[in-house]
Amino acid sequence: MAIFIFILGTVLGSFYLVVATRLPRGEDIVKSRSYCDSCKHQLKWYNLIPVFSYVFQKGKCIYCKKKISLECLLVELIAGLGFLICYLSYGFSYEFFLGVVVFSLTVVIYISDFKYLVILDSSLVVAGLMTILIKFFYLGLNQVFFSVLNGLVMFLVMFLIQKMGEVIFKKEALGGGDVKLAFVIGLILNVPLGLAAIVLSTFLALPYSVAYMYIEKNNEVAYGPFLAGALMIIFFTMDKFTILLDFLFSWH
Ligand SMILES: [Zn+2]
């Protein structure tokens, strides 16, 4: 079963890479077949087996011999390992399925936001719907309503931060994608941990933003990967964060 989960992760990882690099460029991923990025030759199924094709083709396209970027192999391996770690830590449980959603969303946002400064609506919609389904199945309808409310609160908080940013910096400081992502974070973590994720994300983003603005002389910095990263860190260490929050906010 563990091997199956790992392979499933590599297959989905390969799909996430296609989604996150082709959709922002306005390409159709449902109708168009996979092709080589340099010679545009259509790829056969045996050129598309995650990890294996890369290894057996020695990292080159078999049609034009151009190097395939190492990124493909990395994303496939990382996704496979992520899925495997979720399965080994949680078995088939509520935490496993939600963990896979959190991890998948983070992978897609990392690629699309760092490359194109875009958080795809489709990735948020799919992650949101999957979360609602999983919570409905394991926790029931009341918890789904409660989580949607928490999502809306987080959306409002982020929306206010965005508006304040516009007033202070006189330009758009936070993208609309970040505000929509806050809804999904609230949906998954609920408000107390969701707010903790926002605070954590600012600490994660700060060194990168300062370095990026200094080196690239460009102040359009991706923030989504840090929000998603904070979501992932808090989700997978949730029990510890809950203890910390209880400790901080209890006065007895
Ligand atoms: Zn090629």
Image (spheres, helix red, strand yellow):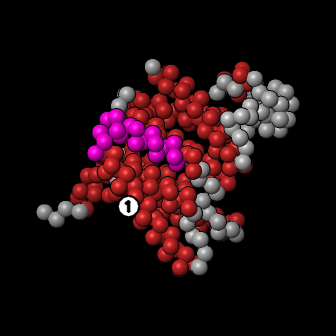
Magenta residue span: 124-142
Q: Residues within 10 Å of mark 1 (few under 14, many from 20)?
A: some
| Above/below status of 112 relative to 90 | below
Secondary structure character of the magenta stretch overall = helix
Front residue of 126 and 249:
126
Is residue 200 in view from this perspective?
Answer: no
Asked if residue 137 is among those painted magenta in the image, a careful observer would answer yes
Image side of residue 156 versus residue 212, left or right: left
Q: Which residue is mark 1?
A: 153
Residue at 46% across / 46% down in the picture?
Answer: 128
Is residue 17 in view from this perspective?
Answer: yes
Q: Position of residue 171 (x, y in %)?
A: 61, 75
Q: Image quadrant for the C terminus?
A: bottom left
Q: Position of residue 237 (x, y in %)?
A: 36, 46
| Above/below status of 221 relative to 49 | below
Q: Residue furthest left?
A: 252
Asked if residue 106 is among those painted magenta in the image, a careful observer would answer no
Image side of residue 156 versus residue 138, left or right: right
Front residue of 156 and 99:
156
- In what element is the residue under mark 1? helix
Q: Image quadrant for the N terminus?
A: top left
Residue at 40% across / 29% down in the picture?
Answer: 88
Q: Position of residue 199 (x, y in %)?
A: 42, 62
Task: Count the numbered circles shown.
Answer: 1
Q: Quadrant of residue 118?
A: bottom right
